[in-house]
Image (cartoon, helix red, strand yellow):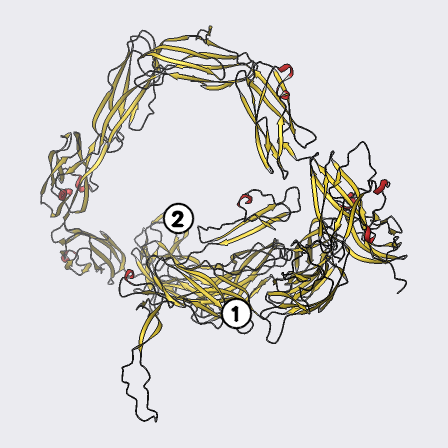
Amino acid sequence: MADYGIDETKRPHTASVIVNTEESATFSVIFKPTLCQRSQAHVRLTVMDNQYEDSVIQMVGEGYEDEITLDNVHGVIMPVDPEREDGNMAEDDVSAAKSNHVKFGDSYIKEAKTLTFTMTNHSKTNCVRFQWPDHPQLKFSPATGHLHAEVAKDMTVTFKTDVPKNLTDQLVPCKITRITFDKPVSQVADWDDRLRTVKWVDVTPPVSTAADGTQPVQPTVPPRPSKKKVIETEPEPAFIEIPESSRNIDLIVSANADYCKYKCKTDTIRFKDTLMFQTRVFEYQMTNKGSVQMDYNWQVVMENFSPMQRSVTFATDLERPESRASSVTSFISDTGSGYLPFSIEPENGTIAPGKKASFTVKFSPLDVHDFEARLICSIPNLEEGKLGPVIGVKARSLMPYCHFELEDSDYISSARRNPELPGPNGAPPGTALDSNTRVIEFESVGVGVKNLRTFFIVNPTNQTYSFMWMNEDSLDPKKAPVFTCLKPKGTIRSGKKQEISFEFLPDELDIVESFWKFVIPEHNISIPFLLAGNTKEPNIALDRSHLNYKALLIGHEAVETVYMTNTEEGPFHFSFLEDSCHSAGYAAHLRVEPMSGWIQSKTTIPINLYFTPNSDKEVNFNLVCNVKKKTLPITVNVKAEGYTMSCTLVCEDSAGSRVELTSNGINEINFGEVEVNEQSVRNLFIVNHGKFNFDYTWEITERNPKGYKMVTVTPDVGGVMFGEKQKCALAFCPPSRTSLRGCELTLKISNGPSYNISVVGYGIAPGLHFSFHSFNFGPCFIHRAGMPKHVANLKVTNKDKKDISLDCLYQQSSHVQHDFEAQVIPPGKSVEINFTFYPREGKRYHETVTFEVNGLSKQSVEILGQGTEMKIEVANPKQKMVNFGALRVGQTVKKVIPIVNNSPAPITFNLVITPGNLALQDPGVLSWSPRNNVVLEPRGGTCKVEVVFSPKTRITQFTEEVLLECAGMNQPLLVLMGSCQGVEIGLDIEAMPFGAVVQRSQSTRKLVMTNTGDIGARFRWDIEKFKPDFSINPVSGYISPGMEVDFEVTFHPQEVCQDIRYESLKCQIEGGKPLKLTLTGMCIAVLPVKEQQHLTTHVRQRETKNIMIMNRTNQLWNLRPVIEGEYFTGPEVFTVEPQQTKPYELSYKPLSMTPEGRKHQGSVFFPLPDGSGLLYNIVGTAEHPKVNLRIQREIPCKTSYVEMLPVGNWLKKPQRFRVKYEPMRPDKLDAGTTLKGLDYIDVPGNTKKDYKLSFYAHKEGSSLIKVTFTNEQTGEYQYFEVTFKAVKPGTIDSIDLSTPVRQSVQHTITLKNPLSYGVTFAATCTVPEVLMPNQLVVPGDTEGYFILEYLPLKVGETQGKLEFVCNDLGLYSYDINLTATQAGPERALYFRTCLGTSQIQVARFFNFAKQKTDYLCSRPTDNPDFHTEKSVPAAPGSSGGTEVALDVTYEPSRLGESRGTLTVSSPVGGEYSFPLFGTCIPPKPQGPYIVRAGSTTSITFRNVFQHTTAFIFQVDNPLFHVTKAGDNIRSRKDHRIVVGFDGNDSGSKAAVMGKLIVSCARSAGGASNVQWVYYLKGVTENLNK
């Protein structure tokens, strides 16, 4: 077996490789990860022209990174039998090989096996200490040691056991601990327990004693000191372990140790009698029954045998001649050699566990003797007391008359001989040859070659005899014989050998036969010989049979190379015919190098053919090469054609006229005057007048000192087809005013002429004048709307004699703009262009405005400027805020503030103050100067601003900005602050009407004084003015700023009066104007008592009552009723028509509740026009408030909800309410229900404010909540009734899971328990494929994690519900969307069997269905060669599945690869797919079938094809026959073929061998012919027995 991995010259290419028969190819795959991740790749092996031989090698690697790694882990590579290796094409998830796996393989008991590996510390700073554990079978060296940073250490592990032991992927942890030393690491030597220290210690000699043992004997000479060598382990350096740095690194170890066990059924071998120099063979087998590989060594031990006692000895030491019974070469040795008649192959080797080994015992006698021997097999590692097999061998040798040292030939036995050839002595074709005919084959390469074949004839007898060779061919006098015997006769002495030589000289190709007879006259022995010579043509050829030079330029020599290859074993001479090197008429000559020579064996030599065309026509050569010993010459046809180049160059100017240029001399092209950057073009045409294409190249040489490239040719290279022309553009474009001189242009035609051209031209500039080329606007304030523009005027004048077009290429920007549009400027005219500068930022601006002149040249104008901020600032930053302080009326304050211009530009501005306070708008109160047209110079210009504040009245604290107004823009400059304090006291009402008061009664009303000023003041009423009908209390006092004082004014009229009025009652205010009050009332006599009017309502609810007023007069009454009472109101004017009765609507709206026993009192008095009046007493009762609002809400559980409650304030002043929640139904809220909100809410006067009430419920239920808002000062309250109905919650979340069938996927759900005690969640799911616990217990105030697993069995999508129910927290609902995708195929089944036989493999899968089910097995429709049962029962699946086994039968019907898919499905358990891969190899021979003479036997044959097929039955030996030459056999049916044996016609009783061959048409057997071979053995009964 050859291995490409050894021969570097045969290393396969990465893309393809050729693997010959019995060869192998080796590929190196390197894995170099760059990331810590899993990497996968595939190598696809495709066999060309065989679609069934696609192989995919899956490669899996995992890159990892660690501080400490185990590298270079070596292991025993166990051989793998590819025929029995299971495929894993269907497995996608293949684990990567572990890099830390040590494989000892098979080991013997008590035998130590050591492997090596390396431990590497990749850290750059850390030093670690390692320690391997003690293991009964494993020993590490070193077991303990230190590993410094960036250091690797080689280690060994030894496996040894005294009893059978199997270690499978056993983890051996190595403890790794980071350590430090008390001194630098560089000063600490590396250490492990392998380091040893050698010491020599003194040994005290033993003290000798006296003979009686009493006194020691004193030596007369002191003893010499004795030394003893002591080897100790070097002590470990002191170290410090880093806390919590220890960890383990695992080493995986696999090993198998056991005793060897064998089985050998053969114990005795008996050979049949064998002639000397012949060989008989016996085969037997031995099986390894153990679990470890078994080594063996056979030894042949002869019994009573001496190699010196031989019947015949030979003078020469030659190889033992090969027998006719086998192809094994024996040898003949002299008397001094160790000759043994028995041999065994193989003598030693190894048998894998569970395997068999075949052994061949050969008997090759060189003497006549009865031989006995023993075959003793030595097997190590057997159990104690057991020995290896011992086989006894017996044999006997016989003496032959002669022996031919010839190798056996299968020329006749393998049917290689053509039966149409004649037999000996002119026998007709088809004549059967003597079965004892010996064949000598000759192979000749080429005719006329002498082929010599030499061999020896041995005389083993003790007598000398003569011999002769006789030719039995029918001689043809016209033909010389091709075979000659060089020693036709002679004598062979006893025990000697004679050399015989035959010569074969062929004169034609094909097979030639010659029949000879070897005769020993003394013993009347005649042996037929057949000499067969096969002559082949020498395999010498050129790599091509024709060669075409195609078109060649006349006069140019071309060379082509052809290669001559010799694949034969010897050299050959060759020579080219000179005549064949000339064309017809000797018009052209082909030069060949070499013309003659020798080509060595297995080599290739180049043959160069040179040709130079001399005319423009096609020539043809038939080159002939004669090879010695080759019957036919080698020929090659050579064609060539000559050609010349024919072209012209034409120049076309701008006017269209054309001029042909010459290739002889220099041509001139003058462009004249060309404007700068204008491109002037001349067209050049290259015309091809020839028959062949050519290429051209332009070369330009410009002598320009500035390096400008003004002349170009496009295209500068190219090709011109024959009969066509190519247009090239020559362009002149001057970049400035210049003169083109010394420019040379050259056109080079490949294999053709060249054209030289001188190019002349001038560049001129247009006469356009710009008034400036740069303008600087200088510093300008950043532009804002309303500011003046900065404009520059550019004047452009045409001073040329022709029109000039001008265009501006500048893109308008936000800071530089112009008003120019493209136009043509006539000669002598000008155009003005305005540039406007708008600085947008505080920076320098530099813009280049480019003008395009005539679309050719460009002129640039630079626009410069600077944008600056308007930096008008207060000189002293502390005066940015000017505070006048708190003044009194009449005081005056003046402030002077210097301001400065820090900007680089002058500025003119106005100072503006726009006070919002009306008092400040008085020019006498707040004034400033200067105001208008203030001018400040740039960079430090200053002025002083004077501000005067002189308040005349009280002014509250004010803040006013002083604005700088410039060009419509306002900018704050500074801020003025101040105030004027004063007295401001007022009454809530200036007129207080009391209405009608009964004489000698009184009425009291409330009056409020408020101080809204800044200063407190004393007050005093002029009490004397109130008398006698009114009084006020208190009369005098002090009122602080922001305070109120309540007064009680009492009306107690003394006399009846319709109108009592006291006007301008004064209250003196300290430091302020006096307040005035007007009091009015009337005094009436006692009216008849009327019935009281009672009104009852809820507080803050309006109640009305009608009082009927009757007008019995004829006068229209316009009454103004007088109503007393705080909460009673009615229309101010009431009209009653004459003689009418009309209701007066009296309203009662109490703002406070009436306490028990106290009611709201009031009256309504109707003054009549006649001076009388109607008086009604009113009594009001204010009950508890009604509910403000009843709210009902349905809220899903587990959803936060906020209800907005509109809380109103019925007073004019703010109120603070305390919020209280009262569950009304049920009495107590559920533990899972929460209400949240603020404890207090402040509501401004006469407004409403929303109160946020948060509600959250875990479980379903209804809660009626009373929410009360109480003013704790007044006791007034309002409330809302809110009903929250917690309904079934919606879906909390959607869970999406996807997985292939029969592969589980997990999902975790977090359930939070907000309660203070533990709760239990009961879980239910509508999808049975979801596996989960029934409940989950979550402690209080914690989170629980619920894990569910989805294990689908069928492909599809499923929707379902997952619910958790808790008595305290309600329902949790989740939508689950489950997707089960198609699973990958199961483990593939691989079959390999012969055509005509079947093979059974077991398909195994796991049933996950929870109930018993039957799986239907669908036969692969794509390949009927696979069979299985229709169904297979499956037991209910456990948690990990229940294994189900199914037999699959592969019965191929054609050769090659077969593929199919077996589908196993169940409505409950899902579907499984098994890839099936079958390999059908050609049928192997069967038999032998024994047929007795004169009888028949039947052989069963099966039609494996899919249809009825016609088969042909043939035998290769005429002694056998079939009763029927063929038959049509139905598909998959057995047929009995009857074979008969006629007996041996030669009268011999020897067994006759033959073959029965069954064949069919090519179309029936597939892509190749198929034959079934059955060995036949014809036996003739011995009648004498």
Q: Amino acid at mark 1?
A: Glu
The residue drawn where x is 28% and y is 85% is: 219
Q: Residues within 10 Å of mark 1 (few under 14, many from 20)?
A: some
Image coordinates of residue 341 in percent, x first then y, are 69, 62
Q: Earlier in the sequence, mark 1 or mark 2?
A: 1
Q: Which mark is residue 159?
A: none
Taking the image as drawn, is residue 1260 in sight?
no
* Relative horizontal placement of residue 808, taking residue 524 as reference (left or right): left
Q: Residues within 10 Å of mark 2 (few under 14, many from 20)?
A: some
Residue 779 percent coordinates (x, y): 20, 29
- Label 1 belongs to which residue? 111
- How far across and down, in percent of the image, does residue 757 sit? 41, 11
Q: Secondary structure at mark 1?
A: loop
Quadrant the C terminus occupies: bottom right
Q: Residue 1577 placed where, x, y %?
A: 82, 56
The answer to whether residue 248 is left or right of residue 540 is: left
Residue sitting nearer the eye, 1570 or 121: 1570
Q: Which residue is mark 2?
A: 1138
Q: Mark 2 belongs to which amino acid?
A: Pro
The residue drawn where x is 21% and y is 36% is 971
Viewer-proximal residue, 4 or 371? Answer: 371
- Provide the secondary structure element on which disc 2 rests: loop
- Foreground pick, 489 / 940: 489
Residue in the foreground of this view, choosing between 1043 and 2: 2
Q: Residue at x 61, y 17 (%)?
A: 618
